[in-house]
Image: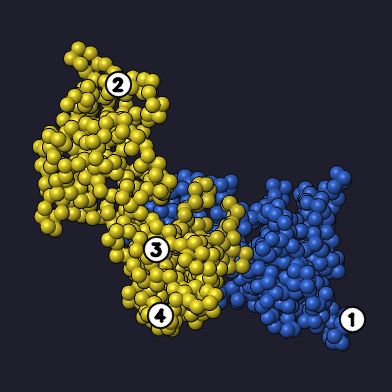
Amino acid sequence: MGEYVIKLPDVGEGVAEAELVEWQVKVGDLVREDAVLAAVMTDKATVEIPSPVDGEIVWLGAEIGDTVAIGSPIVRLKVAGEGNVRDAASQATEAGAKNTPTERSTPTPNPSPQGGGGRAATSKAEPETAPRSSEKTPTHKGLSAAGGESPSPLWGGVRGGGTAAGGGTARTSGAPRPEGEKPLASPAVRLRAKEAGIDLRQVPGTGPAGRIQHEDIEAFLARGPLLAKVSGLARNEAVEDIKIVGLRRKIAEKMTLAKSRIPHITYVEEIDVTALEDLRAALNKEKRPGGNRPKLTLLPFLMRAMVKAIADQPNVNALFDDEAGIVHQHGGVHIGIAAQTASGLMVPVVKHAEARDIWDCAAEVVRLAEAAKSGTATRDELSGSTITITSLGAMGGVATTPVINHPEVAIVGVNKMMVRPVWDGTQFIPRKMMNLSSSFDHRVIDGWDAAVFIQRIKTLLETPALIFVD
Amino acid sequence: MKEISCKLLVIGAGPGGYVCAIRAGQLGIDTVIVEAGKPGGTCLNVGCIPSKALIHAAEEFEKLSHMAGGKSPLGITVAAPSLDLAATIAWKDGIVSRLNNGVAGLLKKAGVKTVHGWATFRDGKTVAVETEIGMQVIRAETVVIATGSAPVDLPSLPFGGPVISSTEALALSEVPERLAVVGGGYIGLELGIAFAKLGAKVTVVEALPRVLAQYDAELTRPVVKRLAELGIEVLVNAKAKGLSTKRDALLVETNGGKNGKIAGDMVLVTVGRKPVTEGWGLEQIDLDMAGSFIRIDDQCRSSMRGIFAIGDVTGEPMLAHRAMAQGEMVAEIVAGHKRSWDRRAIPAVCFTDPELVTAGLSPEEAKTRGEIKVGLFPFIANGRAMTKLGEDGFVRVVARADNHLVLGIQAVGQGVSELSTAFGLALEMGATLEDIAGTIHAHPTQGEGFPEAALKALGRAVHV
């Protein structure tokens, strides 16, 4: 029997580290060659790590949410025959020092002394049973394990402890008193409640027969009142700790970066899309020679209009390297389309929109949206945009304040289209109106330029024939 | 006379009023209390205390009479005892007097000013007191009405002459040869039994189908049995119609409409008590009433701001210890503390022979609220009861079936009044059957019947 160490492979061009987002195995599992062990995420692509050999998992080197350097050992397998490890001991020590997830969840404040004690006992027991426990954890970057997925059965124990620690939970669920029944408490408890201004009817009793005890008053004072049951509404005191990992963490980092570095200016303008909608309906009705022309949405028209507007104002189609103080103004218009997927926000990119006609744009948007939603979009398809469109479709609202896709300098937001009355000089007429809410990096784009850019798009969309005239 | 101004004025120095005033004084409130009689109210002067003195004397006399009969199983024989009731009453008066002085002293010690006289409201803040030396006007920020209650008479039997109330019965200088007691409630039976023991031929006339009708029949059975042993005749379903023309007999109408005559030197009327709501100017302040009582909320506040009412004038049960608890609470409210009436149990004791104690709900009352368990332990199985010749009676515990919370406790038997302490505490603390069963009770005492009854309710009594 030998030991085989799997190191995190190079999962993408120029990537030095990746975030572990999923374990599909746990210690003790038998795995076949090519079975998926884990998923890691780089920038915007998720990569699955397959097992190169058959074997039994004996060690997992990272916790979900850990950022692991390329080349770090992440799994050790027991394999038949010789493994790839010469000195298992030194390997383990090295790896342990690097990644051993001994950081424990911090117990949440618990009003119950019993509950707290129970949990403390559980936590104390863990290091003894955990073979990987180590004092050397300074490089560990994982977040609290509370509520996270458990890669090993040992952690299952922790969660069990956490549940049992609901001495607090049991406390609050004390025998419910039937409506109108007097709360049961000794005179001393009643006096204390009276002086503290507590309505005992709201205090759950944990004593025999639901008797309210001094500790219940303390717990109540610490926790605050539960709403009276008579209202039919119950106060929910639960706090769920959700670990921000994977795509969500990427989005969080990206949004923080964008909002903390870019002084946004947002410009909202109203577009009359009646003519555009007529045209779109006519084009969609037209027999499609190839038979496989996609249905046109508003998006391809907007993309083409942007290409035209950018031709006049190339400074909005750029990436701003603010550390170097250089704006990389691109000739090609690579339009990111912000898309909501099951796991979060993704931005597939339509490359070279300037070289695509309206049908091509439409087809590419459909293809990328599906790829993003099914999770098959490649890293290349999810990067390289120079300007972005964001749209919530029917949910678009009246106006939004889009966040620029850093390091780009502009984002165009599409709001909901609706029929509104418009004064034509003599009367109100119903027109299909839609707002564009667009944000610009004010460091490199002035309000005036932003307005000119959007006004140009407005002109093109309101007279859509102009989109097709060179 | 110079007006008195104070923060708190208490009208009536019965157990409610004087406790309220003392507590207020302790809390540093400038307090005045007005009382026309001696301090202590009905309880101390013509109720609880003197009746217990008389009952005790009667018990002692009866024991000796019994021994003189030569039939005492204790093997004691004495010469026939004689009684000087006037001396007994003087002894009783001595006790009352000592307690009067005690209350007066406590009031003084607490810094309460006492004004002797009859108070009448002029308005919600002003009271005029007729004192021996003239009219005293008192202005107060807060007034507590603690005027108490008085015996009720019957239209056909107005008090006077041979028709007496409990007050006069406690001050007789001779034992009446034949005593008719109208009303078989606890006051009538306590005094009727006492006079029977002192040698009177006692007949009890009760309009309801049984005596002590507010208690259940199981609980009163040992008392009814004892009444017969003492030679007390009990007429139930009988109405007192008045005195005979010679005023030496009570006319009664029994169940079938038959008229009868009960020869009697004295007729003691104990048909109940009524709140004292007249004669002190209630009409001047026009408080909301609840029946014949002053309506109060859970802080003993009346419908007028700044006027509280406590004790018998506020309703049933008309018991001294209820009034005391209310008085204490009101004093603390006036002192700015947060208080409200939240008592769980007001035990009631009936000093008949044997004694009765109730606290909390009876089995019947408890049944209406859900499923219950009842455990009853008879004193016939209690060693201490045997050694006192007190095997009649029992302790009974009523608890919820689902969580065993004790809802009510009753007992009947010799000397069980002292068990009221344990019963009240158990209910006030929210004890379960297991709490009582799990408390060690000293042996040999009648109190052992308490955990035994709880064990019985739990289905595991040891001594029965």
Residues tagged by mark 1 and mark 4 found on one chain of the structure: no
Q: Nearer the viewer, residue B67 or A446?
A: A446
Sequence-wise first label, 3 or 4 = 3
Q: Which residue is mark 2?
A: A279
Element marked by disc 2: helix
Looking at the picture, do discs 2 and 4 lie on one chain? yes
Chain with colour blue in the figure: B
Please report, as a chain letter, where disc 2 is located.
A
Q: Which colour represents chain A?
A: yellow
- The alpha-carbon separation of the residues under discs 3 and 2 comes to 48 Å
Amino acid type, callout 1: Lys
Label 1, label 4: how far apart the Cα atoms are: 103 Å
Frontmost of labels 2 and 1 is: 2
Residue contact at pointers 3 and 2, CB within 8 angstroms: no
| Front-most of residues A265 and B72 | A265
For disc 1, the marked residue is: B71
Quarter occupied by residue A337: top left
The x and y percentages for residue B199 are 80, 71
Residue B355, can we see it? no
Residue labelled with disc 4 = A91
Residue A288 is situated, as x and y percent measured from the top left of the image, at 38, 23
Give the residue displayed 49% in from the left and 73% down from the top.
A77
Which tag, 2 or 4, sits closer to the chain's start? 4
Q: Which mark is residue B199?
A: none
